[in-house]
Image (cartoon, rainbow, N blue to C red):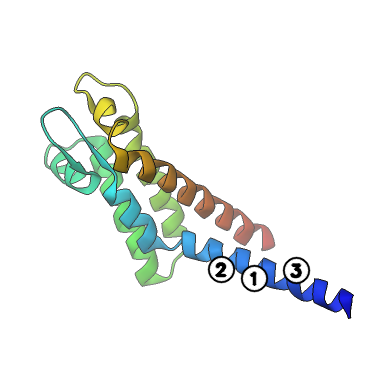
Amino acid sequence: MDLMVKVLVIKSFDAMKIDLLRILTYPILQVLVYCSIVTGSVYFYGPLVLVHGLGVLHFQWNALLGIAGILLVLLSTIRRFQLFQLWGTLLMLTGIVPHLSPSIHGIQQITLTHPVSLVLIPLFCLISLFVLIRFYLLYRKQ
């Protein structure tokens, strides 16, 4: 009887890990966290999606990659093609890199001192890591 209880606990713990991984890698949550990161320059700052929207008007490569990543991740929920989420995650990660590196416009100072960004950037990186782990586990089975 004791062995049966241990087996049930282990199976329920494995199911809980898979459910948590599925929740944390849900594309809508990933996009919401990414768009909520507060960033900008000394001239304008706000949510990352607004900064990227203005950057697209000026054809900045990081804004184009970020918006393309958002669209691919959202497309993965509509088309049920999971590889779009992986590509979108990689594009969003490359779109956020300039906001974390030093620049002449003071982007890093605003991004890394805003309290919302200090919480959301590690959360987005953690979600992106979970997406990569999920795809590794998914394609390892095949």
Residue 142 percent coordinates (x, y) = 66, 63
The answer to whether 71 is drawn above or below residue 129 in the figure is below
98 w.r.t. 117: above or below: above
Determine the residue positioned at 42% across, 57% down. 85
Q: Residue at x 29, y 31 (%)?
A: 113
Q: Residues within 10 Å of mark 3 (few under 14, many from 20)?
A: few
Kindly check if marks 2 and 1 are in contact, taking CB atoms under 8 A apart as contact.
yes
Q: Position of residue 1 (x, y in %)?
A: 89, 81
Question: Which is more toward the observer, 13 or 138?
Answer: 13
First reached walking from the N terminus: tag 2 or tag 3 = 3
Q: Is residue 74 above or below residue 43?
A: below
> As shown in the figure, which amino acid type bears the numbered disc 1?
Ala
The reply, left or right, for residue 81 in relation to residue 62 is right
- The residue carrying mark 1 is 15
Point out which mark residue 114 bears. none
Q: Amino acid at mark 2?
A: Asp
* 95 horizontally vs 45: left or right: right
Mark 1 Cα-neighbour bin, 10 Å: few <14, some 14–19, many ≥20 = few
Residue that label 2 marks: 19
In this view, the residue farthest toward the top is 104
Disc 2 is placed on an element classified as: helix
Instruction: Name the disc covering residue 10, or none.
Output: 3
Q: Secondary structure at mark 1?
A: helix
Q: CA distance from mark 2 to mark 1?
A: 6 Å
Please identify the quarter of the rendering in which residue 6 is found. bottom right
**133 left or right of 63 in image:** right
- Of residue 8 and residue 80, the one placed in the foreground of this image is 8
